[in-house]
Amino acid sequence: MYRCSTFYNMKKKLILIILILLKFSIYVYGQDSLALKTPDEFGKEVLIAFKTNNFELFKSLLITEADHELILNKMKVSDSIKSIYRQQGVGAIKHLNAQAKQNFDDILNTAKLNNVNWEITELKEVKFYSKQKDEIERGDIIIYLKSGEISFKLILSNCHKNDQWFIMNKVSFTY
């Protein structure tokens, strides 16, 4: 009787472990599939943030210190160069995040002053201009948009990619 219940308990534990691993693998795959892996996917997400006036979505597209550290770890440069990049990056990231709401609101206000209606704004094209350096994919992403008869661009300069793309600088609105 004792052996039977021990075997039954071990079997239950094994099934539980398998279910936990399966759930974890589905979660990891799901997170990976949410990553914005191409400039086109990234451009569409930036547009959604502005179309829906969703600052939290916009903020999630900004690089974080943790993302920056992951990018630094991929770089094939000396530790002293990484240290310089780390110091510069931390300051720039803090500034970017501190100014994010103002930048977001400035884009919305500039669009409004120029009679852009976000509800009808369409994505026309996303162009990527590579500036790959030190084994890190980076570059400028320009999102071409049209709102009725008004054509305009959102310029995302010096974006960096780790597992997904990140905004590294202030977003600009131009014609």
Image: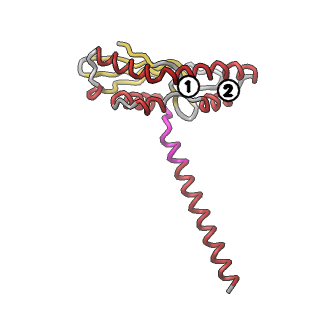
Q: Is residue 16 above or below residue 136?
A: below
Q: Residues within 10 Å of mark 1 (few under 14, many from 20)?
A: many
How are the residues colored?
secondary structure
Residue 69 highlighted magenta (yes or no): no
User: Which amino acid type is marked by label 1?
Assistant: His
- In which quadrant of the rendered view does residue 8 lie? bottom right
Q: Residues within 10 Å of mark 2 (few under 14, many from 20)?
A: some
The mark found on residue 10 in the picture is none
**Residue to which mark 2 is pinned:** 75
Mark 1 or 2, nearer chain start: 2
> Which is nearer the eye, 81 or 55?
55
Residue range of the region highlighted in magenta in the rendering? 28-38
User: Which amino acid type is marked by label 2?
Assistant: Met
- In which quadrant of the rendered view does residue 42 lie? top left
Q: Examine the rendering and report whether any part of residue 43 can be seen.
A: yes
Which residue appears at 75% of the width and 24% of the height? 79
In the displayed image of the protein, which residue is found farthest to the top? 175
Q: Examine the rendering and report whether any part of residue 129 can be seen.
A: no
Residue 32 in percent (x, y) is at: 53, 42
In the displayed image of the protein, which residue is found farthest to the bottom? 1
Q: Is residue 172 left or right of residue 114?
A: right
Q: Is residue 49 left or right of residue 25?
A: left
- In which quadrant of the rendered view does residue 53 lie? top left
The C terminus appears in which quarter of the rendering? top left
Residue 139 in percent (x, y) is at: 53, 20
Whole-Å distance between the Cαs marked 1 and 2?
12 Å
**Residue to which mark 1 is pinned:** 160
Which residue appears at 26% of the width and 17% of the height? 115
The N terminus appears in which quarter of the rendering? bottom right
> Which is nearer the eye, 100 or 50?
100
Q: Secondary structure at mark 2?
A: loop
